[in-house]
């Protein structure tokens, strides 16, 4: 029996305009195409693991060379990306429905401050637990992040169901004994949740 549903956030419940923001800023600052996507990838690689707290710490540590694009612009870019986050209004009702039947938790590769983002978006009450890779210092698909979630919820791995848009993350959860659903769209998710809950 499923006692908890563990939800990924990015590209499942939450969507950001990161690509369009990066493209616009690359044009504005005459940077090579894709350079800010690379910057963000490298930043996330450390921030998701809890190795840096924010973009300022990352900048000071890594000293990236982006020409006229300096720390102030990087901070503003991160602010714009954060401000662009939107809730998928077709997925949120599914979270509400699962919360009526079992515990719910966020399990997400995220930088520092995930709880603040959830509060700003009015999502805190939808989840019994929030497990951020930054706080655990373990990123999906590593098992430690899933272990933290099931321990926090006081359940066994086989009593949890994990939903994520990345196959490798779903497989990481399955290796621990957590059931998994690969998110490919709302209609498939409705069907799969109906079969398991």
Image (cartoon, rainbow, N blue to C red):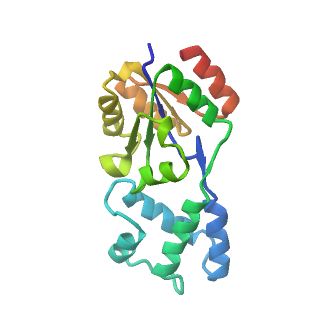
Q: Quadrant of the N terminus?
A: top left
The residue under the point 41% across, 31% down is: 173
- Residue 168 visible? The answer is no
Residue 35's place in the image compared with 192, above or below, is below
Q: On the rendered structure, is 45 left or right of 79?
A: left
**Closest to the observer, 18 or 42:** 18
Image x and y of residue 31, in percent:
60, 79
Image x and y of residue 116, in percent:
44, 54
Q: Work out which residue is located at the far top of the displayed protein and give it.
A: 1
Image x and y of residue 149, in percent:
35, 34
Count of all numbered marks drawn on residues in the image:
0
Image x and y of residue 98, in percent:
54, 25
The residue under the point 46% across, 36% down is: 127
The residue under the point 58% across, 67% down is: 80
Q: Quadrant of the C terminus?
A: top right
Residue 106's place in the image compared with 44, above or below, is above
Residue 9's place in the image compared with 95, above or below, is below
- Residue 111 visible? The answer is yes
Quadrant position of residue 29: bottom right
């Amino acid at each position: 029996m499923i006692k908890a549903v563990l939800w990924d956030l990015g590209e499942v419940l939450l969507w950001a305009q990161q690509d369009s923001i990066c493209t616009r800023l690359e044009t504005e600052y005459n940077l090579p195409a894709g350079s800010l996507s690379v910057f963000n990838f490298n930043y996330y690689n450390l921030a998701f693991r809890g190795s840096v707290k924010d973009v300022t710490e990352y900048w000071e540590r890594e000293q990236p060379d982006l020409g006229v694009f300096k720390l102030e612009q990087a901070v503003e870019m991160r602010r714009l990306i954060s401000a662009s986050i939107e809730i998928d209004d077709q997925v949120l009702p599914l979270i509400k429905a699962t919360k009526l039947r079992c515990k719910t938790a966020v399990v997400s590769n995220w930088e520092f401050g995930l709880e603040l983002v959830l509060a700003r978006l009015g999502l805190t009450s939808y989840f019994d637990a929030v497990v951020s890779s930054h706080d655990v210092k373990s990123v999906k698909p590593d098992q430690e992040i899933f272990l933290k979630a099931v321990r926090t919820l006081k359940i066994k791995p086989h009593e949890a169901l994990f939903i994520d848009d990345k196959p490798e993350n779903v497989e990481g959860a399955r290796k621990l004994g957590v059931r998994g659903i690969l998110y490919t769209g709302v209609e498939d998710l409705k069907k799969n949740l109906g079969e398991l809950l």
